[in-house]
Amino acid sequence: MRVTLWASSYEDFSQRLRAYLAKYRWELLSMEKTDVVDPSLDYDDEVNQMIDETQQDQDAIRLGAFYSYKPN
């Protein structure tokens, strides 16, 4: 899942994301490739839109494409 939100640190990011997901009874299992947005880069259309929306509302948490897998 792609996520954008304002955070002051990795710990803040993790805490805010976990609290948000808990509202829907979802649990964060792991995080990979977390990084600060680099304004000099052009991300794909979906991520660019998420970044723009998050910049307009610094309290927002945006969730992008996510993937699920059926258990075997």
Image: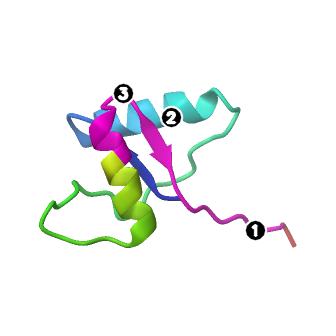
Q: Which residue is mark 3?
A: 59
Q: Residues within 10 Å of mark 3 (few under 14, many from 20)?
A: few
Q: Which residue is mark 2?
A: 18
Nearest the viewer among 15 and 65 is 65
Disc 2 secondary structure class: helix
Stretch of the chain drawn in magenta = 53-70
Q: Pinpoint residue 59: horizontal percent, then vertical percent.
A: 36, 27
Q: Amino acid at mark 3?
A: Asp
On screen, 39 above or below 15? Answer: below
On screen, 48 above or below 15? Answer: below
Quadrant assignment for the N terminus: bottom right
Q: Which mark is residue 69?
A: 1
Q: Amino acid at mark 1?
A: Tyr
Q: Residue at x 67, y 39 (%)?
A: 26
Nearest the viewer among 44 and 1 is 44
- How far apart marks 1 and 2 lie (CA) works out to 21 Å
Kindly tell me whether residue 4 is visible in this rendering. Answer: yes
Q: Amino acid at mark 2?
A: Arg
Q: Is residue 53 left or right of residue 65?
A: left
Q: Pinpoint residue 36: horizontal percent, then vertical percent.
A: 22, 54
Q: Earlier in the sequence, mark 2 or mark 3?
A: 2
Q: Is residue 21 left or right of residue 46?
A: right
Q: Earlier in the sequence, mark 1 or mark 2?
A: 2
Q: Residue at x 53, y 31 (%)?
A: 20
